[in-house]
Image (cartoon, grey):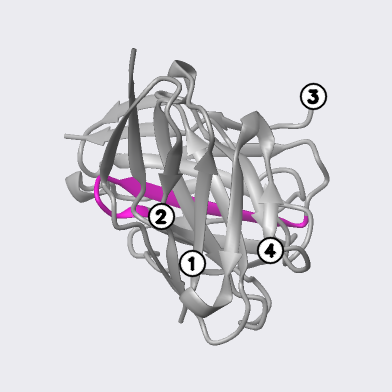
Amino acid sequence: AQSVTQPDIHITVSEGASLELRCNYSYGATPYLFWYVQSPGQGLQLLLKYFSGDTLVQGIKGFEAEFKRSQSSFNLRKPSVHWSDAAEYFCAVGAPNTGTASKLTFGTGTRLQVTL
Amino acid sequence: EAQVTQNPRYLITVTGKKLTVTCSQNMNHEYMSWYRQDPGLGLRQIYYSMNVEVTDKGDVPEGYKVSRKEKRNFPLILESPSPNQTSLYFCASKVKRNTEAFFGQGTRLTVV
């Protein structure tokens, strides 16, 4: 079964600073990978996704993520954080070869705080 | 506008009183799921549906029921809610098996 680890529960960065949120997965083959963002009181919004091909993926709101097979990682990055980026971020993995449903398995989330 | 709509957004109920949380999507998606979100645990799948009249258990199905009589609707039923079902619930849909999921706004349920 697949699993996802987000080792940082809470991160604080200054506005304008760069950001990297870590995500490690466990799966026997190449999974589908996603980053979602959850703003307070809101649902989950897809930031970006990786299915195959180029390992550097661009998403919305200036975010990008890089799939590194050798490290089983899919870290999320942003070069300059804005105060509106304060939210909770979830990494998720979908396993293409696990039957009909291919459910998403989520990490426990990283809460990002942005200081002005 | 393409969306997944859940109702109600907030619900406080008492132990044992049956309740239903509705979920509707307007994207003609085949796959729909219910997740619960708890602090420190992320989102865990409760039930999913691959199409009309096809449903199956996720990781935490105990105490929940679902039905899929129409493609657009996927209600979550708690026949006898208990306090350990106090949580934030999300409905999600996706167009086919290996694609991204679209989420509703969430339903915050409190069982006292």
Query: Label 4 belongs to which residue?
Result: A55
In screen coordinates, is A92 left or right of B15?
right
Indicate whether residue A51 is drawn in magenta.
Answer: no
Name the residue at the top extreme.
A116
Tell me how far mark 4 sits from mark 2, CA to CA: 16 Å
Q: Which mark is residue B22?
A: none
Query: Label 1 belongs to which residue?
Result: A73
Mark 2 / mark 1, whichever is N-terminal: 2
In screen coordinates, is B15 left or right of A72?
left
Q: Main secondary structure of the magenta part?
A: strand
Amino acid type, mark 3: Glu
- The one of B111 and B15 positioned closer to us in this rendering: B111
Q: Nearer the viewer, mark 3 or mark 4?
A: 4
> Could you tell me which residue is drawn at 60 percent across and 38 percent down?
A63
Tell me how far mark 2 sits from mark 1, CA to CA: 7 Å
Q: Nearer the viewer, mark 3 or mark 1?
A: 1
- State if disc 4 and disc 3 touch (CB < 8 Å): no
- State if disc 1 and disc 3 touch (CB < 8 Å): no
Tell me how far mark 4 sits from mark 1, CA to CA: 11 Å
* Magenta region, residue range: B30-42
Q: Is residue B80 above or below residue A43?
A: below
Amino acid type, mark 2: Arg
- State if disc 1 and disc 2 touch (CB < 8 Å): yes
Amino acid type, mark 4: Thr
Task: Give residue B110's position: percent from left, percent from top.
Answer: 26, 33
